[in-house]
Amino acid sequence: MKATAIAPSNLAFIKYWGKKKGHEEERLPVNGSISMNLSNLITTTTVEFSDDYGEDVILYNGEEPKQRSLQRVLKHLDRIRLLKKFQQRAQIVSKNNFPESTGLSSSASGFAALSLAASKAANLDLSEKDLSILARQGSGSACRSIPDGFVEWLNANTSDGSYAKSIFPHDYWNIVDIVVITGKEQKDTPTSEGMKRAYSSPFFKKRLQHIEARIIECKRYIKEKNFKFFGELIEKEALEMHTITLTSQPPIVYWHPGTLCVMRAVHLWRQEGLESYFTINTGHNIHVIVQEKDKEVLAKELSNLEEVNEVIINYPAQGAQLSEQHLF
Ligand code: DP6
């Protein structure tokens, strides 16, 4: 059977940074996290299992994936074969509408789309929770691209408890995430490697002491639609995560000159009355959060910066969905 899924990337407001010791394979994070699905950063994936395929064949953006990504996808297919208790090989065609490995969480949309498409193609009817757990094993943040809108990934010590659920639907709050592309070069330290180093930062323990309170605060500001407090919180959170990367051993600097330029511009515009806040993942590209009423002005200001190549406007979105538009 053949199935196609479309899944959004997601933006973490409270970030997943570090895996629980002894649970790295299962991808159990050291803390819970909060995110929003993004309407315009999308992966589409078609999967077909058949006895006719002698081996798994994967085409990602028109090419065979690099060895590291290929191994991760093959391992994920094995998880699905184990659940279904069959041996059939698969053909997979997948495409993204945005650059990968630049801080825009392509593994989140990628493993969410793969989990939904492959489980359907295998005729497994997984609940949203079980799909989220499956996606998490491919890439942690992918578990948050399964449910609708604003999402919480629960902190748990077991695989069964470590999944994401919607806390507010996508149409609850019309904030906008302007994704700012400052370059397409790929990051040199993969996220999984970066997370391993988190424990070596002298600030990591401190982070874990207040992260739960921060999650509660974040959920409250979303509920109240308190843009100012929400914005200040997510910017503080992003800078804290990067404090950990900068002070890990060996240190990791994910920012490029263009990233810093956007960070400084956001602060300047804010002083002048254009309210927006930034957050950054593991890459040089940067997300700027703004209210609907200010999105045009801000997108224009950002596009005028010399360091900015492109901006992509995103609204809160639904999670992974099935589609009839097969890629082969
Ligand atoms: C900085 O989900 O890409 O974007 O589980 O190793 O695949 P793996 O990591 P991944 O990490 C995302 C890290 C982050 C923060 C976040 O999305 O919460």
Image (tube, rainbow, N blue to C red):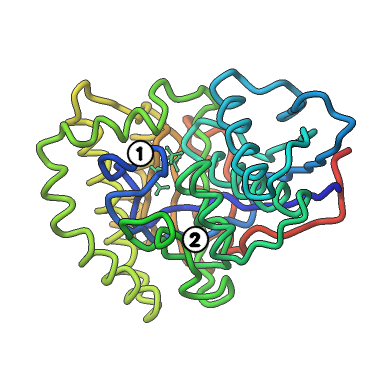
Q: How many marks?
A: 2
Q: Horizontal and vertical percent for residue 252?
A: 28, 26
Q: Identify residue for label 1.
A: 24
Indicate yes or no: mark 2 CB to ligand 1 under 8 Å.
Answer: no
Q: What residue is rendered at 76% in x and 49% in y?
A: 122
**Foreground: 22 or 288?**
22
Q: What residue is rendered at 89% in x and 38% in y?
A: 328
Q: Is residue 161 left or right of residue 311?
A: left
Crowd tier of the residue under label 2, counting other residues whose Cα lies within 10 Å: few below 14, some 14–19, many 20 or above = many
The amino acid at mark 2 is: Met
Q: Identify residue for label 2.
A: 36
Crowd tier of the residue under label 1, counting other residues whose Cα lies within 10 Å: few below 14, some 14–19, many 20 or above = some
Give the quarter of the image for residue 311: top right
For label 2, the SS is strand
Q: Is residue 85 above or below residue 223?
A: above
The amino acid at mark 1 is: Glu
Q: What residue is rendered at 29% in x and 32% in y?
A: 196
Residue 299 visible in the current orientation = no
Q: What residue is rendered at 54% in x and 45% in y?
A: 108
Q: Horizontal and vertical percent for residue 77?
A: 65, 38
Q: Is residue 304 left or right of residue 219?
A: right
Q: Quadrant of ligand 1?
A: top left
Q: Horizontal and vertical percent for residue 18?
A: 29, 42
For the residues marked 2 and 1, what is the alpha-carbon distance in whole angstroms?
24 Å
Residue 111 visible in the current orientation = yes
**Foreground: 52 or 19?**
52
Q: Is residue 28 above or below residue 253?
A: below
Find the residue positioned furthest to the bottom: 224
User: Reading the chain from its start, which is encountered first: label 2 or label 1?
Assistant: 1
